């Protein structure tokens, strides 16, 4: 069991959703469903962030293998990278 305190405006909004939607039999059902959805979304976001971190680590390794030592790139370096990319993709 979990006790939750919400302000009056939020409680009234929940009561309105329960009454109008007909999807929930009570505040408790609404809150349980909301918690399940939020938890699922948070877990999905956590997986996405894990994948994102792994991708950035791989990208950083590729950059280091190509000579990138950190810091901001000069205009000349940016142009070189852009040219290599366009050549790789067959645009030039």
Image: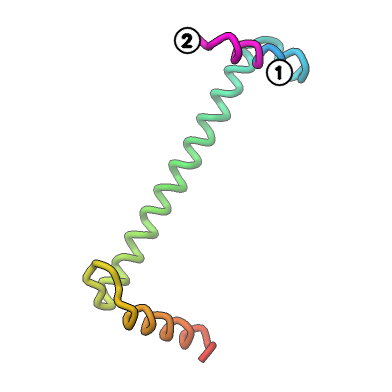
- Tell me where residue 80 sits by quadrant: bottom left
Q: Residue at x 32, y 80 (%)?
A: 77
Residue 36 part of the magenta segment: no
Question: Is residue 81 shown left or right of residue 2?
Answer: left
Q: Residue at x 47, y 10 (%)?
A: 2
- Tell me where residue 62 sits by quadrant: bottom left
Question: Is residue 43 shown left or right of residue 10?
Answer: left
Dot 2 falls on a residue whose secondary structure is loop
Say if residue 85 shows up in the picture.
yes
Numbered label attached to residue 89: none
Q: Position of residue 21 (x, y in %)?
A: 76, 20
Disc 2 versus disc 1: distance between alpha carbons?
A: 21 Å
Q: Is residue 50 above or below residue 16?
A: below
Say if residue 1 shows up in the picture.
no
Q: Position of residue 13 (x, y in %)?
A: 66, 16
Closest to the observer, 30 or 20: 20
Q: Nearer the viewer, mark 2 or mark 1?
A: 1
Identify the magenta region. 3-13
Question: Is residue 61 shown left or right of residue 84?
Answer: left
Residue 5 part of the magenta segment: yes
Given the current orientation, which residue lies at the most extreme left position? 69
Q: Position of residue 19 (x, y in %)?
A: 75, 13
Identify residue for label 2: 2
- Tell me where residue 73 sits by quadrant: bottom left
Identify residue for label 1: 17
Closest to the observer, 77 or 63: 77
């Amino acid at each position: 069991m979990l006790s939750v305190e919400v302000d009056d405006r939020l409680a009234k909004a929940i009561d309105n959703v329960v009454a109008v939607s007909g999807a929930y039999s009570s505040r408790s059902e609404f809150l349980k469903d909301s918690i399940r959805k939020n938890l699922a979304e948070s877990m999905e976001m956590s997986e996405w962030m894990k994948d994102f971190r792994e991708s950035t680590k791989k990208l950083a390794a590729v950059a280091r293998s190509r000579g990138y030592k950190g810091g901001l790139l000069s205009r000349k370096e940016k142009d070189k990278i852009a040219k290599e990319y366009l050549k790789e993709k067959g645009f030039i």
